[in-house]
Image (cartoon, rainbow, N blue to C red):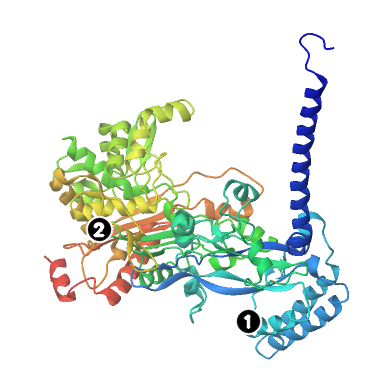
Amino acid sequence: MRIQGELPVAAYRRRAVRFALVALAICMILIGRLGYLQFVEGPTLKMVSSNNYVRTKRLPAQRGSILDRNGTTLAVHEPAFGLAFQPYLLKDDDIPTLITELKTIFDETEGGKNSSKKDAVRTIHYLDLVKQLKLPRGADRFRPVPFVVDGKRKILTRKQVAQIESLRATISGILVDHRYMRRYPQHEHKYEDEDDKPWKLGAHLLGYLGRPTAYEIRANPRYHVDSMLGRAGLERRLESELAGKDGFERYVVSASGRAQKPDVAWVKKAMEGIVPREDPKRGFDVELSIDAKIQRMLTSAMSGRDSGAAVVIEVQTGAVLGIVSKPTFDPNVWSGRLTRRRKQAIDNDPHKPMVDKSVQAYFPGSVYKIVTAFAAMDLGMLDPLELIESPGAYEFGNRTFHCHKRSGHGRINLARALSASADVYFYKLGEQIGIDRLAQYGRRFGFGRRTGLSINGESKGLMPTKAYHDETTPGGYQYGLALSTAVGQGDVRTTPLQVAVAYAALANGGRILKPYVVNRVIRSDGSIVREAKPTVVDTLADQADFLESINEGLRQAVHDEEFGTGHLAAVKDGLIGGKTGTAQVRKLGRGRNRHVIRHFRERDHAWFAAYAPYDVPKIAVVVFIEHGGSGGKQAAPVIRKILDQYNRNFTLFAQSETAQSDRNR
């Protein structure tokens, strides 16, 4: 009997049998697979999973070199070897032997007559720290511990590498790691003149390397704790092109840390589906427009000056031939690891050695008067031949604006006003032009905007306007501020590099060029990645007559010994055009550091901007001496020294006889 709608008992029985057979089949398959893994593949899998690990070894890429325009090496990545310990592999019984052997190795190679006893003792002292190595827990136990001396990773000699490799055969837990070390060879050799150390040659331009922060490591998978990346200068700006790409090598190691041969069957099994190696890719080389000889000239000429900058550029291309900032630093030290004491001393230096003064903005003083002169002529307010009274002071409202020459200059034209740097002449022009139009013309000369060199926090400077003063000056804009602006005072700020670009434009017919320091970026096979070309940013060429009038004033400023404020810049072999600048600075209030830096900080800035030769200009040169005093007395002689050295090395002036005859015409 069965209930309607229900299956007979036999049907249930058949279904149960089929289900049991299927379940049995599945169980047999699983048991068979487990048996195969246990008895056939078991030994191999056990070795791979329990006692062996696939390790990835980073193969650091060689960073590209930085060269000057003639191929002189300015920065290079060279192979270096370091010693590291693997704490989890170090055995307690081996540590005394390890210390003894390492002491012997370093005593033999560093304790000789070519190194001080102090160095050898210091090495032994740090080796004793090996005794304190503890086995960390977790993933940290696999992280190598670098051997350091005085906070810096110890670089091994070839002899030391060979000795340590021999030691590894008997003691586990030590390794020799291959890396690259950045060197700046032009900053290592020392000359007889202590003030002419080549480590002062363009350190700000080149920059230095440093370790990535924890944030950078998290944000960029390319970086790790041992990476070195550009922190300043061109090393930072060109990081993506110089750095290259690290490679890797993967291999199987035993539990004791021994690398296993790749042709063993179980090793092949462990490496299935894993890319065993990727070669590192070298970074691109960078050829600069800089000439190391010119860098040395600038450094030599600036010796004895506490703080400032010097720039040389080609007037027809905008190529920067030389650029230095004082005081400076040693990039070899900064690319290592500074001691806290040395870092603190640098930070507390009132002359700020880490600040690149060639691209920072300062009061320009009278080197800015070329803008006022050009604006007045272009606006139809000035005939350059017109004689204008220029007394020793100018009354404007309830304020008196003085000239640097209190007795005045009498009735003078534009050329004499520029050569004698007659302030009242330009006060009158500034009153007519107005501060907003002065700012407009300043920007046409390249002031108030970044040049595009893009290094070391380049400042764009400041071209003040009425709106600017209404926002920032107590009491708002006052009409007298236009007078101060006209002579490069007030709130005007320019960088030495900007001034060089502006004076190059006077020399090349009015083209405002974008300055550049990178000539070419080159692949390791010699092919060109990119190459610099002259770029015109703005032009003043439509007003060539105005430029000629200004240039005549710049010639007289140097070669008129009676009235020219820049006669100390005159060179014996040829004519040049140039302009002095003496920029007053604001007085400091009383403060706790006034006895240390007050005298320095309250001196005027000294400027001189020039181009040479006068008739067929090739280069523009700017010297800025921070708080140096008079531009005519302090900066002008530096210009003369630079041009004399340049002429001796590169024949700037064709023939001295021709120049002398031109001077007398």
Q: Are marks 1 and 2 in contact (CB under 8 Å)?
A: no
Q: CA distance from mark 1 to mark 2?
A: 48 Å
Residue 292 image offset from top left, x and y in percent: 38, 71
Residue that mark 1 sits on: 157
Residue at image point 85% right, 68% down: 132
- Compared with 78, 60 (above or below) is above
Residue that mark 2 sits on: 315
Please state which of residues 113 and 89 is positioned toward the viewer in this rendering.
89
- 132 vs 123, left or right, is right
Please state which of residues 470 and 391 is positioned toward the viewer in this rendering.
470
Q: Residues within 10 Å of mark 1 (few under 14, many from 20)?
A: some
Amino acid carrying label 2: it is Val
Extreme front residue here?
A: 1
Secondary structure of the residue carrying numbered label 1: loop
Residue at image point 37% right, 53% down: 497
Foreground label between 1 and 2 = 1
Please state which of residues 649 and 20 is positioned toward the viewer in this rendering.
20
Residue 125 image offset from top left, x and y in percent: 80, 76
Amino acid carrying label 1: it is Thr
